Amino acid sequence: MSDDLHDDDIEPDEPGDSNVVKALRRQAREAKAEAKELREQAARAAEAERRLAFAEAGVSLSDPKAKYFVKGYDGEQDASAIKSAWQEFSGVAAPVDTTAGADIAASERMTRAAAGAATDDANENQRYLDELEALKHNGTKDPVVLQREAMKIMAKYGSQVAQY
C-alpha cells in the first residue's frame, strides 16, 4: 500500500457493509493520517539535522550571505564539508554563531529522537496497513472469519476497536 494514497482511495462506507468493514476503513483512514504526520515529523527532523550541521560548521544562520549559501548548498551534510564549502563560497573563515552553542546539543537530541521515532512508527504503521490490505484480498467472504482475523491484526498492533 503506497503512502501516497488519499482518503478517496478508501472506498466509502456503504449501507450493506458490516461493522468490521467500516471499522477497517476507519482504521485505514486513521493510519493514513498518522503516517502523514510521521512523514511531516521526519521532514522536520531532517531540516533540524541540516541546520545543526551548518551550526556545527560555524555558519551563522543569521548572516544574510550565509542564508543564500545554506539555501543553495547540496553537498555532504557534515560540518567539515560544509565549513570547507562555506569558506570557498565566502572567501573567509566561517562566522561563528555565538548563540548556537547551547542549542546544538538540544537540537541534536531532538533530531535523533524524532528521526528514530518517525522511522520506527512509520514502518510499523505500514506493516499494519499491509496486513489489513492482505486480509481484504485473502478470498474469505465470511464476515465472522473476517472480523476474527481483523481483530487479531488490530490486537497485534495495539489498536483499540470496539467489538461488534
Image: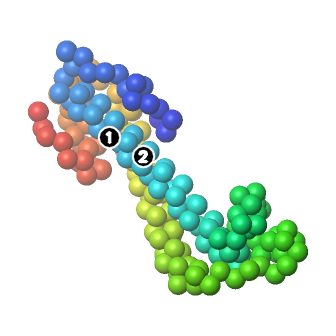
Crowding at dot 2, Cα within 10 Å, few <14 / some 14-19 / many 20+, comes out as: many
Crowding at dot 1, Cα within 10 Å, few <14 / some 14-19 / many 20+, comes out as: few
Circle number at residue 65: none
Query: What residue is rendered at 18% in x and 42% in y?
Result: 161
Residue at the front extreme?
64
Query: What residue is rendered at 80% in x and 71% in y?
Result: 86
Q: Amino acid at mark 1?
A: Glu
Query: What residue is rendered at 58% in x and 61% in y?
Result: 47
Q: Position of residue 129 (x, y in %)?
A: 39, 40
Q: Nearer the viewer, residue 97 or 153?
A: 97
The CA span between labels 1 and 2 is 9 Å
Q: Amino acid at mark 2?
A: Ala
Q: Position of residue 20 (x, y in %)?
A: 21, 30
Residue 30 quadrant:
top left
Q: From where the camera sits, is residue 107 visible?
A: yes
Sequence order check, earlier mark of 1 and 2: 1
Q: Which residue is mark 1?
A: 30
Report whether 10 appears left or right of 141: right
Q: Which residue is mark 2?
A: 35
Report whether 160 appears left or right of 35: left
Count of numbered marks: 2
Residue at the left extreme?
164
Query: What residue is rendered at 84% in x and 71% in y?
Result: 90
Q: Nearer the viewer, residue 80 or 65?
A: 65
Q: Nearer the viewer, residue 89 or 107?
A: 89
Viewport quadrant of the C terminus: top left
Q: Position of residue 125 (x, y in %)?
A: 39, 47
Report whether 50 appears left or right of 72: left
